[in-house]
Amino acid sequence: MTVDLQRQTALLGWYARHARRLPWRAPTGQLADPYGVVVSELMLQQTRVDTVIDYFARWVQRWPHWQALAAAPLDDVLAQWTGLGYYNRARNLHRTAQTVVAEYGGVLPRDVAALAALPGLGPYTVGAVRSIAFGQPAALVDGNVARVLARWYGLRHDPMAGTGKAQVWQWAADHLQPATAACQHPQDWNQALMELGATVCTPKQPQCQQCPVATGCVAHALDLTLAIPPPRQRTTVVPIAACYYAVQRLPQPQDRDGILVLLGKRGEHGRWAGLWEPPGAEGPDAAAQMLTFAEQCGLQAQRPLPTLVHVLTHRRYAVQATAGTLGDRPLPDPAHWGYTAWRWTTVAEALANTSGLSRLGQKIVGLLAAPPPLL
């Protein structure tokens, strides 16, 4: 492929003028902190930039470097991740920190093979670290870059799968040929591609009139920007029925914060591993299981809470929640109900952004804080 050097110069100039100021970004022409690049890239996977900004700031304030993160308890790491979802990203980040400290003296390795061996660092993240943090001419392709390149060259295949994916990765690498502006400034070039896709070459309403490189774009020339890339097949969403109990405890002499709510901690495997939630069950017999749980606990003053829906990428939860007050019986063994521990907390603490609850768990607890419906 012949690289369009004018296109590279135009895009780099546009990025220097219009790049958003983000806390993990370095000024144009400079390299970013490797730790900040890894943290931000793992947070940004399947999460909006606006959401990540506050999370990133809190994270680096608490754990400003690899050593601090490696020494942190996993429970604290998961709690700090509350609300970002896809909690394996947090586990991988924690494991990466421990590996960097144990095997590399607290300095992120520059070698591509060593980077790729770190937990959670796939080809895109490795390319981001190599280019943005180390200034190496390494290609990267995320959804934004794939869309930009697909439109530039008129790709009619899905750029995120199969032959289309291989093609856009090849184009991304071709742009970093020696003696090109992109090769000389790989950190700016890769971020410029991502920025163009995020702010101008958007999926549904591309702003071609504002694009600094619209000239020469095949999709723009053929008026096919809304057809390229082609729509992806919808993911099949599996419906799941679930039942949960919001178990409250009336104030005890040792309680200083009023009514408390019961939480169970999930095990270290499966969905929401290591997170806290009100006791619950899912599947066809979920209601029967939770009825047994209520009987074992001697729950009193039971009342149904509004049904809620919680959607994950591949699953749609229809949740029936019930509130109840703990009687005078002891709590059952948490292991019998799929948990590793119980804990009591206030509603306000459970809804905090560092509570360590799953988002579904926070929704259920939130029903307790919501005003009752008008009759």
Image (cartoon, helix red, strand yellow):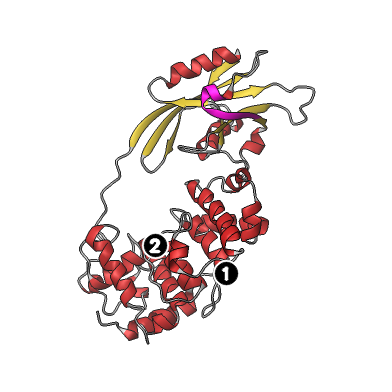
Q: Is residue 125 left or right of residue 166?
A: right
Residue extent of the magenta highlight: 335-343
Q: Earlier in the sequence, mark 1 or mark 2?
A: 1
The residue that appears at 61% across and 64% down in the rendered structure is 105
Q: Which residue is mark 1?
A: 33
Q: Is residue 362 left or right of residue 255?
A: left
Which corner quadrant holds the N terminus?
bottom left
- Give neighbour class at mark 1: few <14, some 14-19, many 20+ (Cα, 10 Å): some
| Element assignment for label 2 | helix
Residue 83, x across and y down, in percent: 54, 45
- Give neighbour class at mark 2: few <14, some 14-19, many 20+ (Cα, 10 Å): some
Q: Is residue 364 left or right of residue 152?
A: right
Residue 237 image-quadrant placement: top left
The residue that appears at 53% across and 32% down in the rendered structure is 364
Q: Which amino acid, mark 2?
A: Pro
Residue 76, x across and y down, in percent: 63, 45
Residue that sits furthest to the front in the current view: 103
